[in-house]
Amino acid sequence: MVDPVNPCLVLFIRRENIVQDTINQLQKQGCADFKKPLKVVILGEEALDGGGVRKVMFYNEEAVDEGGVRKEFFMLLLREILDPKFGMFKYYEESRLLWFSDQILDEDTTMFHLIGLVCGLAIYNATIIDLHFPQALFKKLLKREVTLDDLTDLDPSLGRSLKQLQEFEDGAVEETFGLTFQISRLYFDEVKSHDLVPNGANIPVTNDNRKEYVSAYIDFIFNRSVEQQFNAFSEGFHRVCGGTVLELFHPQELQAMVVGNENYDWEELEKNAQYKGEYEGGRHKTITFFWEVFRELNLEQKKKFLLFLTGSDRIPILGMKAVKIYIQPVGGGEDYLPVGHTCFNLLDLPKYNTKEKLREKLLIAIEHTTGFGLV
């Protein structure tokens, strides 16, 4: 039940202090508050008026906003938290995925708890966030068992090596691989050893126990080595999304609620588009050129356009009908590139005189986007 006095969870955030402001305010909230609609007010710079009184300028949501300020808040917060300077997560280059770092120097898990809260809030507020975690995360949140396939998803090379070990049939595993139940990992340029089982350094991996070795390796990566970090994340997530209803989800469904899916319906995107100013009604020749060019793009180019305009190349679990884009004309002539305002799904589209010019400029714009570029 929503409190009629405070129907929204309102956060007042300064851009330059977004992480600490968020932590300070969320720590004061109860579980019921997290289930209210989230409204974010981003505070601007302070200025003195003529009487010497300090005034604070607020950046409020526009009337046409599709959750723009809230969306910007999630973008800015996650960009800051996931910054390598915090060392909270390890990036796997081969898969381009993140996993909890087992090398954290500070035992304070507040930040992991915060990210869990953020994921839960994103679900409750139907906001896709750019969180590149493997499906194993969502399996663990649902208390499902992680497998070798999950490890291969995160670290393809390691996964293939362990699968090769499991399927090896050309002789004795002990002589061929020379492994024990102890593994070595790099920590800040220093190699450290970990026993996968007690006295692991003295237990060779053999044909008979290799499956136990693979299981112990998977357990170390996904559970033992990051137990403290994951538990804090899970506690934060379940403060928002806990309950028996969560148990009805499959891991891939829960993942789609957080990071979206790829069930594209481009005709729906075109049908739901809205136009401003001179483009209102959608009959301007530049709009006609735009959709003709868009339909001719291949799938990867269309996904890049989605990334360019919305900050993500994935769509909400409700489908493309939940993605509403706005297109408005801008001055400057046809030498200018289109500009995507990711917080508002708003496209600034110059009035190009030819379809060819529009295609040229649009492709340049979408090929140089990095995602979550705030304009």
Image (cartoon, rainbow, N blue to C red):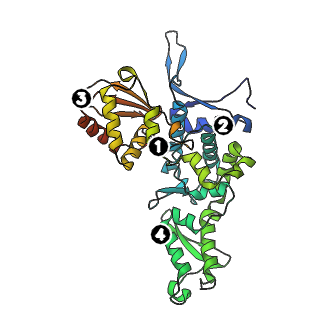
**Residue wearing tag 4:** 157
Q: Secondary structure at mark 4?
A: helix
Q: Is residue 293 above or below residue 280?
A: below
**Residue wearing tag 2:** 26
Closer to the camera, 63 or 161? Answer: 63
Residue 211 image point, x, y percent: 62, 78
Q: Amino acid at mark 4?
A: Ser
Classify 10 Å Cα crowding around label 1: few (below 14), some (14-19), many (20 and above): few
- Of marks 1 and 3, which one's residue comes earlier in the chain? 1
Residue 66 image point, x, y percent: 52, 30
Location of the C terminus (image quadrant):
top left
Q: Amino acid at mark 2?
A: Leu
Q: Is residue 264 above or below residue 191?
A: above
Q: Amino acid at mark 3?
A: Asn
**Residue wearing tag 1:** 265
- Of marks 4 and 2, which one's residue comes earlier in the chain? 2
Q: Residue at x 51, y 78 (%)?
A: 164
Q: Are marks 1 and 2 in contact (CB under 8 Å)?
A: no
Classify 10 Å Cα crowding around label 2: few (below 14), some (14-19), many (20 and above): some
Q: Secondary structure at mark 3?
A: loop
Q: Residue at x 57, y 64 (%)?
A: 150
Closer to the camera, 53 or 314? Answer: 314
**Residue wearing tag 3:** 353
